[in-house]
Amino acid sequence: MTNGPMKTFRKSERLSSGARCKLFATFFVLLLGAQWFAPASVRYKIDDSPLDRSSQATSYAPLVNKVAPSVVNIYSTKVIRVRPLPFPFFDDPFFRRFFGDDELERFRQPRTQRAQNLGSGVIVTEDGYILTNTHVVEGADEIKVALADGKREYTAKIVGTDPQTDVAVLKIDAKDLPAITLGDSDKLEVGDVVLAIGNPFGVGQTVTKGIVSAKRRGGFGLLEYEDFIQTDAAINPGNSGGALVDTKGRLVGINTFIVSRSGGSQGIGFAIPINLARSVMDRLIKDGKVSRGYLGVNIQSVDADIAKEFNVPEGVGAIVADVHPNTPAEDAGLKPGDVIIEFDGKSVKDSRHLQFMVAETPPKKKVTLKIIRDGKQMTLTATLGERPSDLMARFGAPHEYDEPGLTVLEGVQLAELDARARKQFEIPEHVKGALVAEVETGAPAFGAGLRPGHVIVEINRKPVENLSDARQFLREAKGEKILLRVWSRGGSHYIVVPRRTARD
């Protein structure tokens, strides 16, 4: 009896042939499924051969390797005095008795702290002359120059600065330095590829690529002599003083500033042409200063209206608006209304071109002036003087005043808000608008509180970006009164000014 169940159980363990076929088929399917769903080996196309850098169509690395060692980082520091914060309770007898007079007076004293500026520079001679911007080193007590290799750092001295062009020359005590090759910025053309090299935001040496967007840019009011190369190569804070090079690795410009609403690069950067920078550098090294020729005239370019009125070709020459007394221009016989079409044998393109040619000519040199007076050509001879260092203070850089009779603000003269005005009235860079240059004491605007040095930032609730906006909004003004929002040193505030009527 005992063998029966055991025998039956063993029989039950045996699989029928059909079951064995099913089991084998299941195993086979599972085996194939494992092959189908297993991750396949990834096959990449790999080419690890070195890049052919013989053509700039594929790489600018050889060019960068050639010029990058010539671009340095500049760290300048200066000691500034910090005004103490006002604490009215310091005059309270309780606090004076509690803290003591000596301790409170210590808080009243101005303190000093060290401020650091960051910029770039370019080695232009093997024995250590370096080109940079004046604003990078201006007022510095100590200047350090770090080479691109990161291993060498030198203390630099200022050979000279020229704020009129923003060019500065430094000197470090070193030999066999990687001096860059200078190019000819006059031969640049719009569309030429350029590289900007510098130390933006202190992140380390950086290279950006762009093209020459325009030449002979100026009129920004930042410098007395503006003749910039415009480029879309990214230039950021810290790039100032760095190199702008062409595709042969030749220095064609010194990067100096950008136009931006964000503070960073927006594709509008400007560089000082190397021909101008080199001319300034040579004179700073030789004389320690820049002596410029001086004629003694106020000039402006010949536009269509002036050309018609004075019967001269449009877009050629510079018209004399004023002749300063006791100057070479007066001695030569120049008169207001004369159009200067040639200076020392060279054609005059416009007023800025003439300004540069006069400035580049050494003082005491005798020059010829070809002019058009009353429709007739004449030739005059002038012996240039030396441009006075206080010329800006004596004559002032000409403001662009609003046209006579245009403004509806009686007794008020408006002007562009330029760099000179910002410095004179301590106007921050973020403030935009139209400068109040003059206000007659008896004018309604004076009674309303408008003063010279104020900046009109809104007219009838419309934001004013510049003098042109102010002119337009004043033309459009309706009603008997005008609402102005003005900036002053005490902060912005509103002023309501009676509008000048038609009978005025």
Image: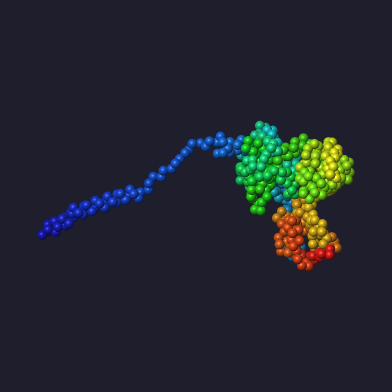
Residue 318: x and y in percent read 80, 44
Q: Tell me the quadrant of the picture where the N terminus can be found.
A: bottom left
Residue 405: x and y in percent read 82, 59
- Taking the spot 81% from the left edge, 65% from the top edge, the residue there is 501
Residue 180: x and y in percent read 66, 35
**Could you tell me if residue 377 is visible in this image?**
yes
Q: Which colouring convention does the figure follow?
A: rainbow
Determine the residue located farthest toward the left in the rendered image.
Answer: 1
Image mark count:
0
- Taking the spot 66% from the left edge, 34% from the top edge, the residue there is 181
| Towards the viewer: 193 or 21 | 193
- Taking the spot 77% from the left edge, 43% from the top edge, the residue there is 316
Residue 423: x and y in percent read 76, 52
Determine whether, in the image, residue 167 is placed left or right of residue 336: left
- Taking the spot 79% from the left edge, 54% from the top edge, the residue there is 401
| Towards the viewer: 8 or 349 | 349
**Could you tell me if residue 144 is visible in this image?**
no
